[in-house]
Image (cartoon, rainbow, N blue to C red):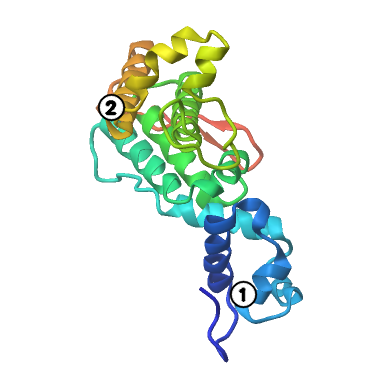
Amino acid sequence: MGRKKGQRLTREAIVATALNVIDEEGLSGLSVRKLGGKLGVQGMALYYHFTSKTAIIDALVARLMSEVDLAAHEPDWAERLRAIHDSQRRVLLGHPNLLPAAISRPFNTPQAARVTDVVLEVLLTAGFDDKEALHACQTLRAYVLGYILTETVGLLGDPPSWDNRDRMSPPDYVEHGLTHLLEVAPAAELIDHDEEFAAGLAAVIDGLRSQRSDGQDLQAKAATPHLKPTAVGRVEVPSSR
């Protein structure tokens, strides 16, 4: 959707139009000149709002990540993690052509980084120590993004997307003796991605629970403040008095 004649050019209009272009043509289809044309301005006019095309892409990732439901009112840490990552998957699936940017540029804006920060907060509050929380956060991120990639690109019985339209089909499996792929190909057509994702996410969270140090529970952790860095980078230990 372009800008109406006489309407002031804004960052929001640029981002919305860029998202439409990427949805239709992919990341490679986005250019400052094309974006300017759709907005009814010279491409150079966009540089008043963004320093580069990369900055526009970062703004797009920020917009998507700001739509993730952080489930702030969910008291159970495991259920909150499930809700956050389920929402993240649904948001990213709404704009699959932007997925490579969301994967490769997760900390370029506060909005994009906030999801990870909240996940770490949930884990630390639930009793994971710093190393365990970081490991758990990375494991969850790898599962969610990896699953979305598989779901989006297509596997076996799924329709291919992106540029992968020349991949092998079941007859090719026969020709090359790929018998195990051929065996499971019919089952792939019956996959319910929502159910499969939910089952896998539950397994990941259960596995992380079993690796957590047997320390403070949610209430005890909340009663013990985290160590806070001072202005000069030293650790401030809470007073015992």
At x 43% / y 31%, what residue is drawn? 239
The answer to whether any part of residue 212 appears in the image is no
In the displayed structure image, the side of residue 205 where residue 34 appears, left or right: right
Which secondary structure, mark 1? helix
In the rendered image, the vertical position of residue 8 relative to residue 194, given as above or below: below
Q: Earlier in the sequence, mark 2 or mark 1?
A: 1
At x 73% / y 73%, what residue is drawn? 43
Furthest residue to the right?
A: 44
| Camera-side residue of 205 and 90 | 90
Which secondary structure, mark 2? helix
* Image spot of residue 147 (x, y percent): 44, 30
Residue under numbered circle 1: 38
At x 45% / y 23%, what residue is drawn? 136
Q: Give the amino acid at mark 1.
A: Lys
> Which class describes the residues within 10 Å of circle 2: few (<14), some (14-19), or many (20+)?
some
Q: Quadrant of the C terminus?
A: top left
* Image spot of residue 109 (x, y percent): 59, 51
